[in-house]
Amino acid sequence: MALTLQQKEEIFAVIRDLQADGLGRKAVVDVLIDDHEVSMASAYRYWQEAQPKDPQPLQDNPGKIALEALLDLLRAAQARDDAEAVQSLAKDIANISAKLKLTCL
């Protein structure tokens, strides 16, 4: 079933709020599936559509792909209270961010 424009905007607002609270892609998708009865495929599609448009697409930038993967791993380590993994991943993220010349995430 297709969503109306208003329903889609509401989903995008939920996604933005969850991301502002620090939730990563997987956690946001899980909330959409569990709380808003969105299918998994649609949840991932809505998450992707809600992301700010990058002038350089992610698939064209291996460094950003690596950074996104590390951020997902960091959030997972934080969720399971794995201090050693958090410390290691934070260091890796800082190194990649410096190489990409990113000042904030």
Image: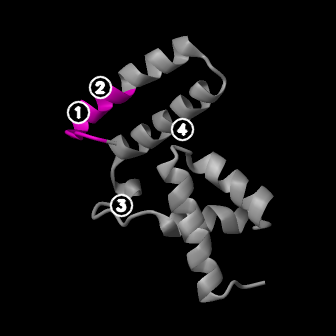
Q: Residue furthest left?
A: 101
| Residue at horizontal 33 percent and vertical 50 percent from the top | 61
Q: Are marks 1 and 3 in contact (CB under 8 Å)?
A: no
Q: Quadrant of residue 100?
A: top left
Label 1: state its secondary structure. helix
Q: Residues within 10 Å of mark 1 (few under 14, many from 20)?
A: few
Q: Position of residue 52 (x, y in %)?
A: 39, 64
Which of label 1 and label 4 is nearer to you? Answer: 4
Q: Which residue is mark 2?
A: 95
Q: Nearer the viewer, residue 49 or 12?
A: 12
Label 4: state its secondary structure. helix
Vertically, is 77 above or below 65? above
Assign the C terminus to one quadrant of the image.
top left
Assign the N terminus to one quadrant of the image.
bottom right
Q: Which badge, 4 or 2, is on the more N-terminal residue?
A: 4
Mark pair 1, 3: CA separation: 18 Å
Q: Which residue is mark 1?
A: 99
Mark pair 1, 2: CA separation: 6 Å
Q: Position of residue 76 (x, y in %)?
A: 61, 31
Q: Which mark is residue 57?
A: 3
Q: Which residue is mark 4?
A: 72
- Side (left or right) of 88 relative to 105: right
Q: Which residues are magenta?
A: 93-104
Q: Amino acid at mark 2?
A: Asn
Mark pair 4, 2: CA separation: 16 Å
